[in-house]
Every structure is written in structure tokens, then in C-alpha cells.
């Protein structure tokens, strides 16, 4: 016992299948709104496919953070990009 | 009376065991299909454009309940597939007008997808968040000080509190940087997300690290042990480990190699 407050949020990697419902929404939004391959817009695999029902992912992330605001002066891009 | 349909793309994989898809409910409750595209497999499903067109998405994404349900549905499909083998997850809300355009898009980018699939292999993502530890109990009871004037004593106490708070913040930020550096050494790649908003996380403590680590298969236990050790060594912060996750944070432009890990965001406003 280390006296620390380490929390484990999912099953042991070698253990039974993790429970999707137990994934914290905030951790999930970090990943599905800012991670994943972008097949349109302005990032990695950006292609100009007019067939795509465009979703401006930048606007999308903004809307998610707008839900979460208030803005923190130094946090928006500090860790995510360089 | 067919509604206009769109195609929601979840992920691209090498091969997909069709059995893994049966019974999976996708976004909007629809079925999930595996479609061959450029030697790869696109995992996608129909959605109604009434709900998932650009305009509708813009509106719906403002709705926290809708966003939560959609994010969970997207993740559920990707997570189930990620347990079968390597895949490249798509960002939320990648919607096409037809399966034909999905196939054309992926075929045109097949080389990139293959490269990413090779790089990821069986690696999984783990998350580590660090918060400033709870404030220690005050050393002296209020009013225990010597008999300076009441106003002066108050101001002095207040100044001490502020300065103690600042140094706790600095210490927590420094610990977070150290922890991130140490943990990055266990990972193939590492990346920092911006700190989470307390309104979303419900966590009142200040977040000083919100990182993701891409781990080789079989290194999860060693990594979790490292987290425990570091938590013991850095009492100024509280650590939380999450995962395994599909490699969401390591398929975009911002993923970085070990030597170039972004430093955790500073909390010194």
C-alpha cells in the first residue's frame, strides 16, 4: 500500500472485456472529438471529396469546448500540438 | 418513402471478422457493415441524414445528451473491433453520402491507412491524468497567531495562503512534467490532450496532465506499475490511469514520437 490515490478505470488488460459504459464521457470526448483520423477538413488525411457531407471538425471541437467553457488562458492548444 | 441516408464511418481495418459485427448497434441504432475498399475493410453503417447531415450535426453536437449517446455508440463499435485486431478509428461524425464514396475515399488513401495500421500493430492506448492533490489541512488554527492587529493578521494569513497555493501549483506542474517524461519512456508514442474542463469531468481539482500513451502489447502491466510508483513518489499530484483504448490519439497529425513528446500544459496562469 503506497498511500496513493491511483484509480483504475477499466478492467485489467489481461482480464475480462472492459465495460464500455464505464468509460468516462469526458475521456471519450477527448478522444473521439480530437483523435481519430480526419478524412476531411484541415488535418492529416484531408482530401477534397465533395461527396463528403462536410463536418467542420474544427467547429465541432469548438462546439464541444464551448459546452465546457470557460476558456482557460493557456490550455487550449498548449498540450495538443506543437 | 426512403429517408435520405448517409454512411457513418467508424474505422478502417485490414480484415474484419464479420462475426464481430453481428448484433452490434451502431450510431442511431443501425446495423454495422464491413465493406471492402482498396484491399482494406471499411466499417460503416447507415444513418438518416435528417439527423446526421451537416446542418443537423451542427445542431445536435450542441446537445450534450445527443453527443454523449453518439460518442458512446461510435466508441462501442470501434472498441469491439479493436479487440479483434488493429484498426484506424475515425473521428466522430465522419459521414458520407454513399458507400461508393466511402470506398473511393479509402481506396485513394489505402497506402496511408496501411502505413498507420502497420505502425499501430497490436499497440493500445492508455490514458494518464494528473490532478493537483487535495490541499493539506492548515498547519495552525485561525486566530492562533500572535497579537498583531486583526486586520494585519488576516492579510498576512491570506498572503501566506496565496503563496502556498502558488508553490503547490508549481510543484504539481513540475511533478506532472516528470511523470510524463518517465511514462513516455515506456511508450512507443505519447501525446498530451488539453486539460479537461471541470464542467465536463465533474472534477474540482486542477488538472495538470491529460496524456495518452501508445503501448506495445504486453507492456500494460509494467506501465501500470510505473504509474503506481510515480504516484507514490509525487504526493503533490493524484494520478488516474484509463485504458486500454483503441489508438484514437495516435492516428492524427498530432501524434508524436517518444523523443518529442509535448510537455504537459502549464497550469501557472
Image (cartoon, coloured by chain):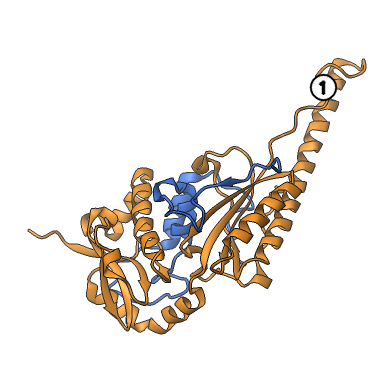
Chain colours: A blue, B orange
Percent position of residue A10, x then y:
49, 50
- Res. A11 visible in picture: yes
Q: Chain of mark 1?
A: B
On screen, residue A4 above or below B27:
above
Q: Residue at x 45, y 61 (%)?
A: A58
Along the line of sight, the residue nearer the viewer: B200 or B269: B200
List the residue tagged with mark 1.
Answer: B154
Q: Residue at x 52, y 43 (%)?
A: B201
Q: Residue at x 43, y 69 (%)?
A: A37
On screen, residue B52 above or below B15:
above
Percent position of residue A19, x then y:
41, 49
On screen, residue B255 above or below B142:
below
> Split into 4 quadrants, where in the image is the N terminus of chain B?
bottom left
Along the line of sight, the residue nearer the viewer: B149 or B32: B32
Res B10 quadrant in image: bottom left
- Res. B8 visible in picture: no
Percent position of residue B145, x then y:
89, 19
In the displayed image of the protein, which residue is found farthest to the left?
B1
Specify whether B185 is left or right of A64: right
Circle 1 sits in a helix, a strand or a loop, which is it? helix
Amino acid at each position: 500500500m503506497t498511500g496513493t490515490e491511483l484509480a483504475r478505470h477499466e478492467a485489467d488488460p489481461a482480464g475480462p472485456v472492459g465495460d464500455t459504459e464505464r468509460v468516462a464521457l469526458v475521456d471519450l470526448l477527448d478522444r473521439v472529438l480530437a483523435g481519430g483520423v480526419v478524412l476531411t477538413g484541415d488535418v492529416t488525411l484531408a482530401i477534397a471529396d465533395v461527396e463528403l457531407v462536410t463536418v467542420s471538425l474544427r467547429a465541432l471541437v469548438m462546439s464541444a469546448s464551448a459546452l465546457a467553457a470557460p476558456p482557460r488562458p493557456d490550455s487550449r492548444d498548449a498540450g495538443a500540438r506543437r | 418513402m426512403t429517408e435520405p441516408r448517409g454512411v457513418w464511418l467508424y474505422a478502417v481495418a485490414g480484415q474484419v471478422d464479420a462475426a464481430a459485427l453481428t448484433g452490434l448497434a451502431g450510431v442511431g441504432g443501425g446495423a454495422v457493415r464491413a465493406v471492402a475498399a482498396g484491399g482494406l475493410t471499411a466499417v460503416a453503417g447507415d444513418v438518416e441524414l435528417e439527423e446526421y447531415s451537416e446542418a443537423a450535426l451542427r445542431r445536435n453536437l450542441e446537445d450534450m445528451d445527443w453527443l454523449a449517446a453518439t460518442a458512446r455508440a461510435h466508441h462501442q463499435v470501434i472498441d469491439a473491433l479493436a479487440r479483434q485486431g488493429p484498426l484506424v478509428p475515425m473521428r466522430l461524425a465522419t459521414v458520407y453520402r454513399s458507400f461508393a464514396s466511402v470506398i473511393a475515399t479509402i481506396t485513394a488513401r489505402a497506402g496511408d491507412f496501411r502505413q498507420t495500421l502497420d505502425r499501430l500493430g497490436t499497440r493500445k492506448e492508455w490514458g494518464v491524468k494528473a490532478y493537483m492533490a487535495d490541499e493539506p489541512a492548515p498547519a495552525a488554527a485561525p486566530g492562533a497567531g500572535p497579537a498583531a492587529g486583526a486586520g494585519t493578521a488576516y492579510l498576512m494569513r491570506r498572503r501566506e495562503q496565496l503563496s502556498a497555493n502558488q508553490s503547490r501549483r508549481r510543484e504539481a506542474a513540475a511533478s506532472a512534467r516528470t511523470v510524463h517524461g518517465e511514462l513516455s519512456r515506456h511508450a512507443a508514442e505519447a501525446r498530451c490532450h488539453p486539460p479537461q474542463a471541470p464542467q465536463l469531468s465533474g472534477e474540482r481539482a486542477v488538472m495538470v496532465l491529460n496524456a495518452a500513451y501508445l503501448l506495445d502489447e504486453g507492456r500494460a502491466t509494467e506501465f501500470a506499475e510505473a504509474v503506481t510508483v510515480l504516484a507514490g513518489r509525487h504526493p503533490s499530484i493524484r494520478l488516474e490511469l484509463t485504458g486500454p483504448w483503441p489508438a484514437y490519439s495516435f492516428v492524427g497529425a498530432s501524434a508524436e514520437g517518444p523523443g518529442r513528446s509535448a510537455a504537459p500544459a502549464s497550469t501557472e496562469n
